[in-house]
Image (cartoon, grey):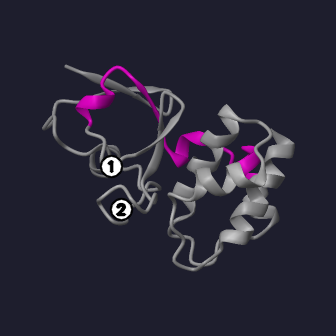
């Protein structure tokens, strides 16, 4: 039986190989922090890390991540103490909050590969994540703040 390492725990997968990772996480593992947004991979609400890289879980099949490491918002830091999560709280980033797990996961992936991004790099990296409430300036400021704490 194929397995996926999800948030540090080996999880067996025996379902449809074409099932999007998003639904495996939400329906099979009850990890509901990862949100369904557009279903087309353009809004970023479903962003998770696969082997440390931000991916859209609605467009990634469970079969594609067999044998890989998947991190969801629940596994980023169990206590919510990742630098990005702390910056989000400090700056009161969320308004409605729906997109925020995806935003946080995208920002964390950025800071993993680039500890000191420029403003332009933050804008470019975060541009694939849509916030319906328009919290972009607070999101940008929180990524900048978190970069100082990574």
Circle nearer the N terminus (1, 2): 1
Q: Which residue is mark 1?
A: 22
Front residue of 84/26: it is 84
Helix, strand or loop under label 2:
loop
Q: Quadrant of residue 126?
A: bottom right
Q: Which residue is mark 2?
A: 36
Tell me the number on the disc at residue 143: none
Examine the structure image and report whether residue 80 is included in the region drawn in magenta. yes
Examine the structure image and report whether residue 49 is included in the region drawn in magenta. no
Instruction: Locate residue 20, reporting x and y percent.
Output: 25, 45
Instruction: Locate residue 28, reporting x and y percent.
Output: 27, 45
x 57%, y 49%: residue: 106
| Residue sticking out furthest to the right | 148
Helix, strand or loop under label 1:
helix
Instruction: Locate residue 103, reporting x and y percent.
Output: 58, 57
Q: Is residue 106 left or right of residue 65?
A: right
Q: Is residue 18 left or right of residue 58?
A: left
| Residue sticking out furthest to the left | 16
Quadrant, the C terminus: top right
Front residue of 9/140: it is 140
Q: Is residue 142 left or right of residue 2?
A: right
Front residue of 17/144: it is 144
Asked if labels 2 and 1 touch by Cβ distance under 8 angstroms, the answer is yes
Q: Does residue 138 appear anywhere in the picture? A: yes
Disc 1/disc 2 C-alpha distance (Å)? 7 Å
Quadrant, the N terminus: top left
Q: Does residue 93 appear anywhere in the picture? A: no
């Amino acid at each position: 039986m194929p397995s996926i390492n999800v948030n540090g725990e080996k999880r067996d997968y025996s379902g449809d190989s074409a099932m999007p990772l998003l639904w495996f996480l939400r329906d099979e593992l009850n990890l509901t922090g990862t949100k369904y947004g557009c279903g087309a991979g353009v809004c970023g609400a479903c962003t998770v890390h696969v082997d440390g890289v931000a991916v859209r879980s609605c467009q990634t099949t469970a079969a594609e991540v067999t044998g890989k490491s998947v991190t969801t918002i629940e596994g980023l830091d169990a206590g919510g103490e990742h630098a990005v999560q702390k910056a989000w709280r400090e700056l009161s980033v969320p308004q409605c909050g729906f997109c925020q797990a995806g935003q946080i996961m995208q920002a964390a992936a950025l800071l993993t590969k680039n500890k000191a991004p420029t403003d332009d790099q933050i804008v470019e990296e975060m541009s694939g994540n849509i916030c319906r409430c328009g919290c972009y300036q607070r999101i940008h400021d929180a990524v900048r703040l978190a970069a100082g704490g990574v």
